[in-house]
Amino acid sequence: MDFREGMEHKYRELLENYIKDQSEQALYAGQKFSRKTIEHKISPEEIVSLHKSLLVEMHPELPKDVIDSFDLLLEVMMGYGLTYRENESLRSKQAELRSEMEIAANVQQTLLGTTIPEVDGLDIGAISVPARHMNGDYYHFVQDENNCISVAIADVIGKGIPAALCMSMIKYAMESIPENRLGPGSILENLNRIVEQNVDPSMFITMFYGLYNPETNILSYASAGHEPGFYYNAAEKSYAELKAKGLLLGIEKKTKYMNYEKQVSPGDMVILLSDGVTECRTDEGFIERETLVGYIDKYIHLSAQEIVNKVFKDLEKLQNFQLRDDFTLIILKRKV
Amino acid sequence: MSIQSCVTIINEWDIVAARQLGRNVAKELGFGTVDQARITTAISELARNIYLYAGKGQICIDKLYEGGKPGVRINAIDNGPGISDIRQVMEDGYSTSGGLGAGLPGVKRLMDQFVIESNPEEGTQITATKWLR
């Protein structure tokens, strides 16, 4: 209550100063005063009332009509005061929600956590950054007893919490599929059945599933409508689209997925991504896939992890640090 | 000890009468202009709710004395449709988003004490009190 007592005195001083010479300085002091009153949660109607009572005291000669008019102003300000206080309380509620979201995002990180496997002859880099708190993209590595590496990259149509919740299910579905040696196509068929049965019909998932055999250096893969990745041919120094056809997960129960194979030569790279990478939007519109290739090529001499990190940094900057969609980029590079 | 007077709310003019009654009582008890405006705003909100949603009801104003401290108590009673989800109407931003005014959370903020009882099909009773500081 200390502030309230001093407030009257302070406002009287401000008012006297302003009435004396109408200076800009006095008005500036008024602005500073309002910052203080807001800080102390003084409502607008209280200021109006204070103003009125000081006027009556300082200028008893003022016509009654003028003084009375402040009662109307006070009544009108009442609603603003209430709205202001409501906003205050909504704002603190928002802060609460935000911290809850941050906790949820951490939980998600733990739930969906995956480690990049260490394999002789293969250099792997991965980055996944959510546009908001929770990530609707997902990637997963598994190394089986034969040292085969499986890599999955998935994207839920949609973002935010619903997408993130859906992703948690996908991870556990994947882990419940027993044998990785089923082949990527069959794995997608299994997942498709699970997604079709368990996920809201309005929600679809795209996924690319790859299985790399370090003995034969063959990558076999299948795709469920996922954004096509790239294949870098080191001998020709050329990039080609890593094409694979297949319907999104969750649309049709009996979908079949084809297996594709690729012989990976030393220095070759497999580049997997989510549509948050290609739908990176600048003022001039989406970036071209060729532009993206250009960014990757710029860093080709670096390690796979450094490439993905640097490409993300560049694209983030290109979008003025506003991600519109979850961003995931994975590079598998066969060591020379 | 309490002295009660009531206004029946049927049309919009009754809201004005209820406000006037509340303002007179608040003034008599020595509430300042800001608190008078708060009390009348609260009465307005409660009376408008009766007028808009219940059709008919009563606003009663009491003078209270507790431990020598005077206060104003507003009692808003109706036999209207009642409120099925009280938690929702007590949420900030629920009624205000439609431009319906301060809503019940606003009334709660304007007064010192606020009690609501409501059952679907039975009506609503809201009691709000403000003490003279």
Image (spheres, rainbow, N blue to C red):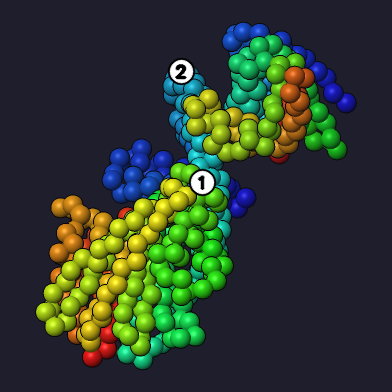
The residue shown at (32%, 76%) is A219
Judge if badges 2 and 1 mark residues of a common chain: yes
Q: What chain does badge 2 belong to?
A: A
The residue shown at (85%, 23%) is B2
Residue B104, given in percent of the width and then of the height, sits at: 63, 31
Q: Earlier in the sequence, mark 2 or mark 1?
A: 2
Relative to residue A115, is residue B26 drawn left or right?
A: right
Q: Which residue is mark 2?
A: A65
What amino acid is labelled 1 in the image?
A: Asp
Q: What chain does badge 1 belong to?
A: A
Q: CA distance from mark 2 to mark 1?
A: 66 Å
| Quarter of the image that includes the C terminus of chain A | bottom left
What amino acid is labelled 2 in the image?
A: Asp
Residue B127, given in percent of the width and then of the height, sits at: 75, 28
Nearer-the-camera pick, B7 or A164:
A164
Secondary element type, mark 2: helix
Q: Which residue is mark 1?
A: A200
The residue shown at (42%, 82%) is A148
Q: Is residue B35 visible?
A: no
Secondary element type, mark 1: loop
Q: Is residue A149 visible?
A: yes
Residue at the far right in the pictured view: B1
Q: Residues within 10 Å of mark 1 (few under 14, many from 20)?
A: few
Against B98, is A165 above or below?
below
Relative to residue B67, is residue A158 drawn left or right?
A: left
